[in-house]
Every structure is written in C-alpha cells, then in structure tokens.
Amino acid sequence: MAASTANAGSLHVQLLSYDFNDETPDDGGQAARTLPLAPRSIALWKEIAAEAGEDLGIRTEGGLMLAEDAAGLEWLRRKSAMERRWGIESHVLGANELRSLAPALSERLVGADFVPAEGYGDPLRGTMAALQLARRAGAHILRGAEVRAIERNGAKWHVQTTKGTVTAGRVVNAAGPWAAHIGRMVGLELPVTGTVQQVIVTEPAPPMTKHLIALANRHLSLKQQASGGFLIGGGWFGGFDPAIGRTHNLRRNIEGNLWVCARALPVLKSLSFVRAWTGINSAIDRAPIIGEAPTLQGFFNAVSANGYTLGPIIGRLTADAIRGDPVEPCYRLDRFG
Ligand SMILES: Cc1cc2nc3c(=O)[nH]c(=O)nc-3n(C[C@H](O)[C@H](O)[C@H](O)COP(=O)(O)OP(=O)(O)OC[C@H]3O[C@@H](n4cnc5c(N)ncnc54)[C@H](O)[C@@H]3O)c2cc1C
C-alpha cells in the first residue's frame, strides 16, 4: 500500500525519539533543519481543507511527548531547547500541568514536551481532497500507469508507462520509497530506501485525549479519532515478503506497540484493537530531497519521510523550484556529495 493512503495522519512538528540522541550534532542535524517546514506545511493543510470545503479531520490542539522519569524529562528539556532554537514553540510541562491538560494519561508520567502546533488529520480524506483540487486545477491523472523508462531528447523528457508515453519539459519524481528506482532510470543515485511501518486502531471509546501523543525514548504515536477509536503507531516495523512484494503485520510488533502505548494511556489495556495494517515509507536522512537534480535539467525530486505532515510544503517548494526559486542546500540532493 502506498504510504499516502496507509499513514497514521499525525501532523508532526517536534523532534521524535530517533531524531535526537547522543549522535545528534550540536546544531541538531538534518532532523532539526527540517523543523521549520512542519508548521508551514500544517498551515497549508488547513488551506487545502478550506479550499476543499471540509475540515479533513484536522485538529491541532498540540502534541505531547511524555517523560516517564527524571532522565526522560531532562532529555525532553534538551530536545525542547533545540526545537526553540529552530523557531518552534515548545514548552516543557511538569507533572501537575500535564495532568490538568491531559487527565486520561498515566499518573506515573513526570512531565512532557508540549508543542502547540502539532495535531492530526484524516489521511484518506486529506489525500482525496488534494487529488480533487489538483483535478480542479487542471491536472490529468493517468491511473494505474507504471513508469517503465524515462529518456531525454533535447529539452524534452519522454516517460514510458504501461499506458503510453508522456512527454514533458519537466518531470517530478515523487515515487516515495520507489524514488531510487525511478532515479536509476535517468542515471541518478538517490539515497532513498523503504521501511515497512504498521498502524493499529482500537474499538471506539468515549473522548479522552485531544492531543497527538508520543513517549520519550520510545516509539509511539497515539491519537483519538473523531470516531472514538485510538490510532496507534510510531514507527514499529511490519514485515515484507520479497517473493510476492507485499507487506504484512508482525504480531510481536503489534504487542510491543500496544505495550508502549499502555504506559502512556492505561485505559488502552481494557480496549480491543480491531485492525492493524502496514505500508512502506521512504527513509532518507531525516530531511526531504527537493529540487532539480544537479546534472539533469528539468528532472526534479520530491521525496520525504514524514510525508503526510510535509506533503503540502514539499509540493509548494517543488512548484517554486520549477519556477526557478532556489532550494535550501540542506534539502538538495547534492548534500550527499
Ligand atoms: C504506516 C505508515 C504510517 C505513517 N504515518 C505517518 C504519520 O502519521 N505522519 C506523517 O507525517 N507521515 C507518516 N507516514 C509517512 C507518510 O505517509 C509518507 O512519507 C508519505 O505518504 C509519502 O508520500 P509520497 O507521495 O512521497 O509517497 P507514496 O505515498 O508512497 O506514493 C508513491 C507513489 O509512487 C508510485 N510509484 C512507485 N513506483 C512507480 C512507478 N514505477 N510507476 C508509477 N508509479 C510508481 C506508488 O505506486 C505510489 O503511489 C507514514 C507512513 C506509513 C507507511
């Protein structure tokens, strides 16, 4: 399943557990350089919703990354300072403030990093709205057309697909985890791989949380949907069967994800989970790859890992790049040398 229809809909802003650790450089590295894109992208999601005439399930009541002990809280303090350094509004809350903001969370928690811009949306509604608006703006969609080869002839690119050849002055490679495969068709090495991620949903429960929730030093993303069900993820891997090219859930990782989740939200232990699914996400170096490929005039890449959050801003920056605007060096392909 492509990530845009399989993802968990979190609108991430703050650094995640795997973005900030002992190996992180003093300036925060690529994940920190990407921080300023997220609030801009969430603002664009809201514009998309307004233009589509529906809310797309978007709720931005803030995100909480929770600490279970003093060491976790100290780590959150350092992480929050890094976020503020990159212009993100980020506050460290103590246990009492956390309890009054989110009373359903575990009483064992000692504090949190609170980032007001975070939230979530409904990924299926969001993707469908983007598709409809693109059509309304004149985009032609060739569904089920697999790109088999790309050739350049002068200033023109010829993209050979299973539904015929498309000729264009500019091509954008937005093939997510398959972007490296598309890149190789034009002799380009893209450092993009794929990871299988899984998402779990529970039975509906009365309203308990309105925040996007994560846990310090653990893999967790958690939010309660409008339907009442909790959507649980956070980068737990699923499996991949190369013989049939399909992804599948891993029982041990469903159990692990639910165990971590219950540490944040104890009520989860009394809920049944009703469904779990998987999808393949792009993996890069924690920053997107945007802009024209250095040696290939007219060939652009637009690939990102936190792509549900960042999709709109990556689209905007790609359109700007096509019009000739420069792309920040930290997002360009030539950063890899
Ligand atoms: C389970 C899961 C949960 C996630 N949760 C979140 C989240 O909560 N928040 C968040 O911000 N991000 C999340 N992500 C990441 C996010 O969903 C992706 O980064 C984003 O959707 C990537 O969008 P994309 O359009 O670049 O790639 P994709 O949605 O993967 O689309 C790539 C498209 O390229 C097509 N393609 C590939 N090769 C070819 C070819 N040869 N010819 C034609 N077409 C081709 C594919 O069929 C596919 O449709 C999650 C991802 C997964 C898998």
Image (cartoon, rainbow, N blue to C red):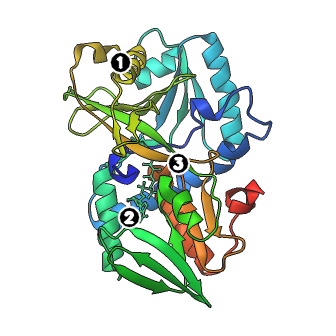
Question: Residue 38's x, y, as percent?
Answer: 55, 51
- Within 10 Å of the Cα at label 2, are there few (<14), some (14-19), or many (20+) other Cα atoms? some
Left or right of 233 in this view: 193: right
Residue 43 tag number:
none
Left or right of 256 in this view: 324: right
Classify 15 as above or below 216.
below
Classify 148 as above or below 216.
below
Q: Secondary structure at mark 3?
A: loop
Left or right of 113 in this view: 220: left
- Are the residues flagged by discs 3 and 1 in contact, CB closer than 8 Å? no
- Residue at 37% x, 16% y is 262
Q: Give the residue type at disc 1.
A: Glu
Classify 3 as above or below 116.
below
Residue beneath label 1, please?
255
Say if residue 139 shows up in the picture. Answer: no
Residue beneath label 3, please?
305
Q: Secondary structure at mark 2?
A: helix
Q: CA distance from mark 2 to mark 3?
A: 21 Å
Q: Give the residue type at disc 3.
A: Ala
Mark found first going from the N terminus, 1 or 2: 2
Residue beneath label 2, please?
48
Classify 129 as above or below 245.
below
- Are the residues flagged by discs 2 and 3 in contact, CB closer than 8 Å? no
